[in-house]
Image: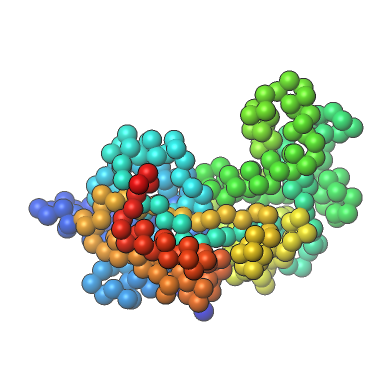
Amino acid sequence: MKFSTLAGTTMLAGIVLASPALARDQIQVAGSSTVLPYAQIVAEEFGKAFGNFKAPVVESGGSSAGLKQFCQGVGPDTIDVANASRKIKDSEIKSCAEAGVKDIIEVRFGYDGIVFASDAKGDSYAFEPKDWFNALAPKVLVDGKLVDNPNTTWKQVNAKFPDVKIAAYIPGEKHGTREVFEEKVLEAGCKASGALEAMVKSGMEEKAAAKACMQVRKDGVAVDIDGDYTETLARISSNPTGIGVFGLSFYENNTDKLQVATMGGVTPSVETVAKGEYPVSRPLYFYVKKAHIGVIPGLKEYAEFFVSDRMAGADGPLAEYGLVPAPEAELKKVQEAVKAETTLGM
């Protein structure tokens, strides 16, 4: 099934009328590029199913950027929903509260994997987290000593890999995918390679060492992608030996252009993520501004529709696109929490 991207992403200017319910008549959503296609599917279907409400406007920009917009305050000039491929941070909750956004509804609607893919006609890879650490870290362990990273080709990283220059297209720092990549791949690889232990033995505090493990070299080997996955795909199209970091669903919708690597001996798929076998996976979220419910027409209905069996269930269009659905019992609890407008801390 193919779903068209919503036309028109320009945010409507809020027109303040006598009734706050009429301040804006269209839901505004922004945030994660991973969650973007799911939110677009829901928005399009919502517009068809609820003729009395306009289809929401859904924009991307990254999890951190979306949550920053979300936390700017309450009112028609601020967004209603923030999509995120990671959980909201305590610091972001504090920023929200300081701006008057005190009641936040957290909705975890399913799961996704982070995959490592290259040109469909190119070399194949079987990665371990330490391969990515040894490719991208500013300093790596060589003969028991931490030295400036000397690796410029994948073959230098792992003798089993092809002798091609390392060109890694990774999510920019404003993306939630980047944080998961840092924690589940770079930090894990740092530990596996022995570099973390070496940092601590050198006198570095463990917390500082863990942070250092997640740093990325700045010599051009790694390229931050601030746009969405289509930009990463375009980079690989222009450099077929490059390797990109993608969400599983994006890869599964572009298998004619990309081939996926294994990680830890496991091929990423809906099944391996659902079973907890694939090591680089994460839950997906969206956050609703409770103060806007009853003010922005259709906001609660949109949230409930998003997590309905019809949309987020195992046989729904989100799963068809590539979402790893939440287990039935978990989804039921999410549906009940959205209906009750349960906020963080309740």
Query: Residue 30: in sight, yes or no?
Result: no
Q: Nearer the viewer, residue 224 or 146?
A: 146
| Spot occupied by residue 218 in the image (x, y as percentages of width and height) | 68, 36
Residue furthest to the left in view is 18
Tell me where residue 158 appears, x and y as whole percent.
85, 49
Residue 177 seen in the figure: yes
Question: In which image quadrant can residue 73 be found?
Answer: top left
Residue 61 shown left or right of residue 180 in the figure: left
Q: What is the image's colouring?
A: rainbow
The residue at 32%/50% (across/down) is 289
Where 276 sits versus 198, above or below? below
146 or 325, nearer to the observer: 325
Percent coordinates x, y for residue 337 in the rendering: 36, 58
Closer to us: 281 or 173: 281
The residue at the point 47 percent across, 71 percent down is 313
Q: Residue at x 33, y 37 (%)?
A: 97
| Picture coordinates of residue 193, whole percent (x, y) | 80, 40
Residue that protrudes farthest toward the top in the picture = 203
Please identify the residue farthest to the bottom as the structure is shown.
1
Q: How many marks?
A: 0
Q: What's the residue at 28%, 67% (across, down)? A: 54
